Amino acid sequence: MTSLQVSAGPADNDEMRAAFVETAGRLAARDVASRVTLLDTHPCDIRAARVLCGTLRDAGMLDMAMPESAGGLGLGRQTIGEILARLAETCAGVALLVWANESAGLAMAAKGGATGGDTGGRFVANGLVTGSPLRATRRTGGDWRMDGSLPFAWGAGCADEVLLAAKTERGGIFARVPLDAAGLVVGDPDDRIGLRACPSATLTLDGVAVVPFAVHADAAEFEGAVADARADAFVLAGAIACGNARGALRRAMQYARERYQGGSIIIEHTLVQGLLGKQLADLRAAEALVATALARGGDDRLLARVVATRHGESVCLDAMQVFGGYGYMRDYGVEKHLRDAKMLCLVGGGNERVLQSVVAAHRMREDWP
Amino acid sequence: MSIVERFSGWLSDRASARRGVVDVLGLPAEVHGRYAGYRHWAETEARALVEAADADLHTHLDTKRDLLRSAARAGLLTAMIPGLFGGKGRLSDFSRHGGMTFLPFVEELGAVSPGLSTLIGAHYLGLMPILLAMDIPNGRRLLKPVCSAPPDDPKICAFAITEPGAGSDAEDDEGGAKAKLGTFARKVKGGYVLNGRKCFISGGNLASLITVFAALDREQGIHSWTCFAVTPDMSGFSVGRVEDKMGQRASPAAELVFEDVFVPDRNRVGRENDGWRLNSLTLDTSRPAVAGIALGGARGVLREVAGWIDEMDLRRDRSVQAEFGELLGRYEAARSLMWRASGTFPPRRDLSACSKFVASDTAMLIASRAMDLMGEAGGLRARRVERLYRDIKLTQIYEGTNQINRLAAMEDYAANGTLSLD
């Protein structure tokens, strides 16, 4: 078995990071590559996704963000980002499945929501990416109830629990909610253009009893905490966009080295060199910003997601042009990179909205940016 | 009524009047008048079948045949074949309006599905060399089965140039001269013997008549290209793989195999060695139509987005207005170029090529940014924009990739230094 846990221990130094990323690469090549087509049905094949979750669980990939005190690997954003990018070179949908759980894990680790019972890779879907449209009320006797409808709960189709945030009268709460909780209905898996290996669904909550692991009495503090969790999820989605684009570019390069036209392989043609060069520049710019944002945090996490997903889509569009007609056929794989790239632009909301939110958050700060 | 209300009423009347005038100037009224009919058929008859074809994971042909039967009942398969050749169209449409004749059709069908537009557009593309060869008696004979087919058993044409080893490069002069061709015709008594393979042929597995381009001489390559009308009942003809595509799934793309296929002399289209000229003329005519398919897709995207904006009550959101306005401006600019390119007869290669790549790049940008505007909802199949995005992508690739079309736009300049900026 390929397992991250083999080398588990105090993580997040360069050496350990390289070892984890390498292990993820082996997992992608051996256990993911053969299932890419199976996981690309529409709507998502929940059974196939669950089987994959078992493989990921066995490999320790569902425990990466959890702190060591809770039995996890305690990896940070940077390492997780690199691992996700590596997985995305083979299948961005699978990377997003891991992302859903790990971005929820980072938020829980930050807010004290990780517990000793989390070892063994209990899958927690991320219900924070779309924001916090839910409401929570405290009843007499002190128990909390959640209500509302939450679209695009990523990973909910095959998760054990979901991480949710809900506004209260003054602030808000964070809670982990089992998906079989009374009053919680998981809708049919969303039928999407891409990232189909990761089933998302709309959750409808009607008086669902929850036990919060974090309670914020102040609305601004709560919104800030949600925004911080979303920003981590966004930059990790940016890392996936980079990995996905790298996969597409590799395919295009390989094709250009093998395809003869006009008496030579097409990578000898200046037109093709220009097209590939543009893709490489787009990719490098995205990778650089994502790496900075993963390391530093802050608003760069949101900007990195915007740049990485836009450039990622552009790289995939151009990669398909290198293939010509063959690129449009499903056999060559580049079309899947493109569909996944487009969906990555939309996870958690469109890029324009993300940019607006960055400026809106700091609009009155004279020392910003 | 207040002065403000009266003034805004006047403004809106002026705006609609102006729109009417601009449309009539840009497009002849009789051509413009056809949009509504095509839209009605596409939305009421074809949409459900298109969506079924898109969802079909196994590229079954039933829905495509149903689409063709419905199109035949609506007269769409013969409406643009001139009466001179046995169809229901008017030659004067082409002489007066050039390729504009095709635009209402490709745009409105494309608004529901660029794949649908390709399914029926490829039929007209297939018969185009026969029309352009202008051998009327032979053309009438070749097209008779198509023009006289009963609606319940329609016959369509397909156009076969692309080969496994010669794709986009066989669609511009310089690339064509170096293309590695793999389909050849040998002269024998009473006809020709064809050998080779063609790939990605739209409607190739459904067609009753296929215009096939084959070289007569290995050394001469495309300069010896000759066009032949092949029917599937000819011995040695077979259909190979049918492609599983990202989009345009309403239109099948098939591989065609020719193994010692005997084609009688009378099925040669045009003269010997005239294939490259016919092919170039056909592409010059069809590229503005591809622009129409792409901008039809963009038209569909804009309609869907407008529906979403209404649903979300965002019509007064200024950032949404600004983004939508940007897309609308680009759409109108590309559409103007498409009209200009299609309104010249015979078509101008530079304008045709420019209209194709500008329109398809614009349509792709519109689809992509429309999805961004809608956020996660934009990626849902139920919202239709994602299907249009997948469909539109092919318009950047077929009829020569957009990279090749940029070269085609510069052919005259590269060869003779001629640059027309009129």
Image: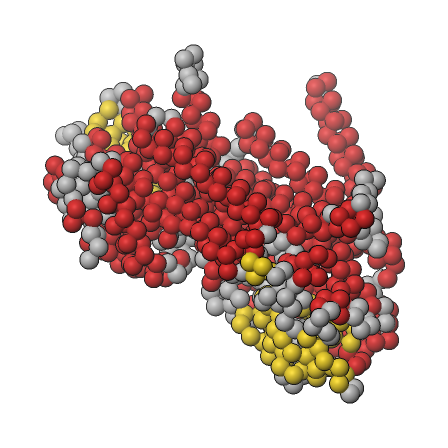
Q: Is any atom of residue B110 visible in this view? A: no
Residue A70 left/right relative to A242: left
**Colour approach in the figure:** secondary structure
Which of the pair A265/B387 is nearer the observer? A265
Q: In this view, does A169 lie above or below A255?
A: above
Of residue B392 and residue B54, the one placed in the foreground of this image is B392
- Which residue is rendered at x = 68% and y = 54% of the image? B290
How many dots with numbers? Answer: 0
Quadrant of the rendered image containing residue B161: bottom right
Please tell me whether residue A142 is drawn above or below residue B270 in the rendered image: above
**Quarter of the C terminus of chain B within the rendering:** top right
Give residue B298's position: percent from left, percent from top: 62, 46
Give the residue at x 25% y 37%: A14
Q: Check the picture and name the quadrant holding the N terminus of chain B.
A: top right
In depth, the one of B145 and B246 nearer the eye is B246
What residue appears at the point 81 percent right and 78 percent down from the top-left corner? B141
**Where is residue B64 shown, x and y percent of the image?**
59, 67
Residue B147 rendering spot, x and y as whole percentages: 77, 73
- In the rendered image, the residue lying farthest to the top is A366
Q: B282 left or right of A367?
A: right
Depth check: A31 or B205 in front?
A31
**Left or right, residue B2 beside residue A5:** right
Vertical arrangement, residue B150 with respect to residue B247, above or below:
below
Report whether residue B288 is seen.
Answer: yes
Residue A309 x/y as whole percent: 45, 40
Q: Measuring 49% from the left and 39% from the top, which residue is drawn there?
A: A281
| Vertical order, B157 against A307 (above or below) | below
Quarter location, residue A224: top left
**Residue B132 vs residue A79: left or right?**
right
